[in-house]
Image (spheres, helix red, strand yellow):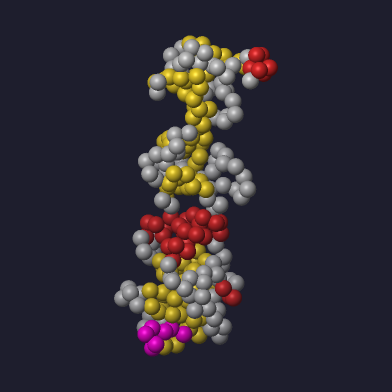
């Protein structure tokens, strides 16, 4: 498994982790690991602190113990003893970090829940569900992943990822060209809606709007993909916008638009 990818997943899921203090998560489950020889080992933790280890049908008996004060699991495999700290725990997976190490993980899957032992697929599904992720295809082919509160619209302050990882500061355009996401410190800073209008003189004007429904002071204005010069433009939709340094400094709605549009 790719260590960087695993670390990203664990870091993003850590706030949703259970703990082995709830012994029913651990005991009498078919916990399975694929070892360094690419062979399957099964560990069954018994209530009396014995540990059944099975590989290729050959079984050994070891011991285990849990130390709640350190959130650490001691596994005595007979040939050696390892002390593991909790990294991420749920009913389907135990991700344990060897004590004293930064990236050396010990990963066990509950084969009743993950029968194909596809740990990355399972973790990615957990991440999608627990973080309530929404996905946006970008113009560069990547997929922007935005965390949000359940049943809420996107808003400033949502965490942002690409390929499970944090995102560099910058502007990220949706593939349709209709929306741009500004990201700072991997946090959604601004959602920019790209709308195009025609002026009464037939000039096509593109405006980057924070408010989807109306043009507002501070919106950026482009003409022919170039920042607009200082000027006043009246749109066919009725708005009279005053532009300075490429920004809208005032906007007035036509009385006639209210009556007839």
Point out residue 52 in the picture as x, y percentages from the top left corner: 46, 85
Note whether residue 69 is visible. no
The residue closer to the viewer here, 42 or 62, is: 42
Location of residue 121 by image quarter: bottom left
Q: Of 219 and 234, which appears nearest the observer?
A: 234
Residue drawn at the location 56% of the way across and 56% of the way down: 130
Is 222 inside the magenta-drawn segment?
no
> In this orientation, which residue lies closer to the viewer: 76 or 94?
94
Residue found at the far right of this picture:
259
Horizontal side, residue 87 vs residue 23: left or right: left
Q: Position of residue 23 (x, y in %)?
A: 58, 75
Which residue is pictured at 44% across the width and 71% down the height?
Answer: 116
Q: Which residue is rendered at x = 47% and y = 73% of the image?
A: 115
Residue 137 point in image, percent of width and height: 44, 44
For the image shown, how many numbered marks are present on the structure?
Answer: 0
Q: Is residue 164 above or below residue 34?
A: above
The quadrant the C terminus occupies is: top right
Residue 54 is covered by the magenta coloring = yes
Q: Is residue 67 above or below residue 150?
A: below
Q: Is residue 16 left or right of residue 100?
A: right
Q: Position of residue 42 (x, y in %)?
A: 44, 80
Res 3 visible: yes
Q: Looking at the figure, which quarter contains the N terminus? A: bottom left
Identify the main secondary structure in magenta.
strand
Span of residues in magenta: 52-58
Write the residue at 49% across / 47% down.
Answer: 135
- The residue at the far front in this view is 260
Would you place residue 244 above or below residue 153 in this image?
above
């Amino acid at each position: 498994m790719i260590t960087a990818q695993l670390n990203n997943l664990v870091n993003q899921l850590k706030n949703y982790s259970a703990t082995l203090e709830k012994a029913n998560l651990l005991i009498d489950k078919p916990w399975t690991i694929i070892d360094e020889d690419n062979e399957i080992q099964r560990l069954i933790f018994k209530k009396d602190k014995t540990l059944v280890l099975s590989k290729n049908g050959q079984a050994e008996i070891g011991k285990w113990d849990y130390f709640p004060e350190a959130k650490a699991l001691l596994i005595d495999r007979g040939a050696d003893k390892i002390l593991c700290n909790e990294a991420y725990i749920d009913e389907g997976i135990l991700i344990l970090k060897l004590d004293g190490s930064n990236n050396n993980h010990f990963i066990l899957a509950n084969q009743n829940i993950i029968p194909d032992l596809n740990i990355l697929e399972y973790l990615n599904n957990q991440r999608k569900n627990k973080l309530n992720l929404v996905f946006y295809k970008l113009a560069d082919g990547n997929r922007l992943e935005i965390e949000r509160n359940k049943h809420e619209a996107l808003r400033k302050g949502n965490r942002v990822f690409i390929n499970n990882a944090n995102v560099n500061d910058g502007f990220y355009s949706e593939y349709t060209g209709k929306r741009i996401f500004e990201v700072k410190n991997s946090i959604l800073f601004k959602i920019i809606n790209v709308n195009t209008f025609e002026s009464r003189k037939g000039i096509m004007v593109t405006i980057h709007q924070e408010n989807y429904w109306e043009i507002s002071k501070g919106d950026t204005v482009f003409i022919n993909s170039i920042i607009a010069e200082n000027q006043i433009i009246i749109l066919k939709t009725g708005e009279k916008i005053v532009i300075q340094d490429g920004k809208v400094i005032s906007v007035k709605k036509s009385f006639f638009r209210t009556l007839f549009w």
